[in-house]
Image (cartoon, coloured by chain):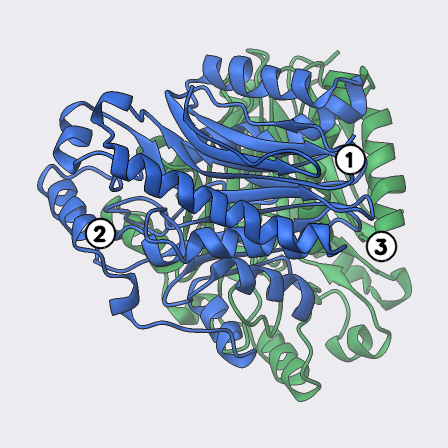
Chain colours: A blue, B green
Amino acid sequence: MPKHAIAIHGGCGTMLKKLMTPEKELAYNKALEDALIAGDEILKKGGTSLDAVEKAVLSLENNHLFNAGKGSVFTNTGTHEMDAAIMNGQNLMAGAVAGVSNIKNPISLARAVMEKSEHVMLAAAGAIEFAKKINVEFEKDEYFFDQLRYDQLLKAKESDVMVMDHSGDTLSNDDTFENGGKKFGTVGAVALDMHGNIAAATSTGGMTNKKYGRLGDSPVIGSGTYANNNTCAISCTGHGEFFLRSVVAYDISCLMEYKGLSLKEACDIVVMDKLVKLGGEGGLVAIDKNGNIELPFNTEGMYRGMKAEGAEIFVRIYK
Amino acid sequence: MPKHAIAIHGGCGTMLKKLMTPEKELAYNKALEDALIAGDEILKKGGTSLDAVEKAVLSLENNHLFNAGKGSVFTNTGTHEMDAAIMNGQNLMAGAVAGVSNIKNPISLARAVMEKSEHVMLAAAGAIEFAKKINVEFEKDEYFFDQLRYDQLLKAKESDVMVMDHSGDTLSNDDTFENGGKKFGTVGAVALDMHGNIAAATSTGGMTNKKYGRLGDSPVIGSGTYANNNTCAISCTGHGEFFLRSVVAYDISCLMEYKGLSLKEACDIVVMDKLVKLGGEGGLVAIDKNGNIELPFNTEGMYRGMKAEGAEIFVRIYK
């Protein structure tokens, strides 16, 4: 059993290899490796799983390739509304923000909600007000601007659809839309530290052409994010509405705690059976207190990776 | 076993009998009875549990005595930000709104999110925009104004505390604050209809002097609200942060589904043991597919009531 380990994801969906170029594949793999290394650096020095998942997600948020932080997609009104959550499996403390704009790293704001407020979840303008009070780093709209994603918005508005997908640089947008390709843009991390504590973190830029202040599962403790030393730490990516209705992350925890299933058995039931029956596309990364890692998804692919103590870095995109 | 049944709550906390007047007690009991009758009318005519819980919560939202709808408390900026959620145990469909203002009945807006959008959860300004589009009933600020609650806000601002409590008309506000009394203002309902379907609904006006767009458990599927024909329907009231971290409603469902516990056993473990150990004050109303009802709370009192087919109306405030 490894003394410490970390696993991450950068979203999932229909990532068809035939539409990927070697350059883009390389860029995604490099970004995943960078995030794993950032988390692993902390873990191997004896740092906490909480620090490791925050640092890994921060690395993904700062990379324009993923739909979170800098790479967040545009809402219907041309803004960026981001959600994030973090949970500490040692004491079940949690923090989340929903619908925040101009925050460089929503995951760090979520952590501040956990550590510097009496609350678990802050939303929209109020969350921004809190962020200003505690001196979290802000960025102007230009920082989040990306021509490709802006073109996606225009295209989505034309056909009046909200696009759940993180149709990023992997596929040309035309390909994505015309092939009905779907990508669920979210990033996340789970980790076990050498003190035996596990943690989870998730961050997302939401949906292209999103209206009505829609919230998905990412910032919801129990659905998109959950951590409990007794069972597992989970970060999800996928069609948020189904993950909310299925309380996915806590469902896996309960299957382990109440039914005695292994992490793998619980993940298989929830992702490959229950979600599929409901029509919920997506995946997740999961770790238990022994450092077992699962990376299940019921879509064509999921940007994912893991690094356990004493093992090589592992990154994959397709099945 | 009854063919249909309904249970409701109007919040919980330290409701000390010595501070209650007979007039106020009567008013609360009457309001609870009215809500139960509204739901029961639907159920006994063969209507759905979904209609029954919406109608019962609507009745409580329209009554100024409870911290939901008309009786919502003031936020720090003197506004009203309300949350609500509804879930259908037959198909696991759910709808929720968070941080909405000037909506007469947030529970009906939550139901519209479930039935007229592709989403589960809409927040703040975006949710209002959706409400305008589908012609939900709006009310001006004056409709929600209440001198007593406004005085509570001034008092809370003076001491710079956010008050989770629904310190309503039961106690004089001075009494409440000086005695450190706490009341968690939320309303909710669960029901079983004669078709064998169960449903849950929850609505709240949040916290007096609330800042930062804080969200509690009420609008969160799995935490404050959950319904699943296989297990139970649950609506919670209490210190929201603890209910979020504990994923309370779904925890009860999982204890039944995965551990084979009865509704009573599951409620006892979650409300009287797990929440108490974490320091989470609150309660909930629960019903299973056989019409068994539980009304557990770990506070001094909870406004609550139930009406099963063939039985008398039951309402209580204290232990």
**Front-lying residue, B184 or A264:** A264
Confirm whether residue B254 shows in the render: yes
Q: Which disc, if any, is residue A289?
A: 1
- Chain to which mark 2 belongs: A
Q: Quadrant of the C terminus of chain A?
A: top left
Circle number at residue A76: 2
Question: Dot 2 lies on which element?
Answer: loop
User: Dot 3 lies on which element?
Assistant: loop
Residue B311: % across, % down:
75, 22
Judging from the image, mark 3 belongs to the subunit labelled B
Q: Is residue B314 left or right of residue A79?
A: right
Of A220 and B188, nearer the camera is A220
Relative to A95, say whether A216 is above or below: above
**Vertical placement of A286 versus A221: above or below?**
above
- Cα gap from disc 3 to disc 2, whole angstroms: 42 Å
Query: Which dot, 3 or 2, sits closer to the camera?
Result: 2
* For marks 1 and 2 on the same chain, the one whose residue lies earlier in the sequence: 2
| Residue type beneath disc 3 | Gly
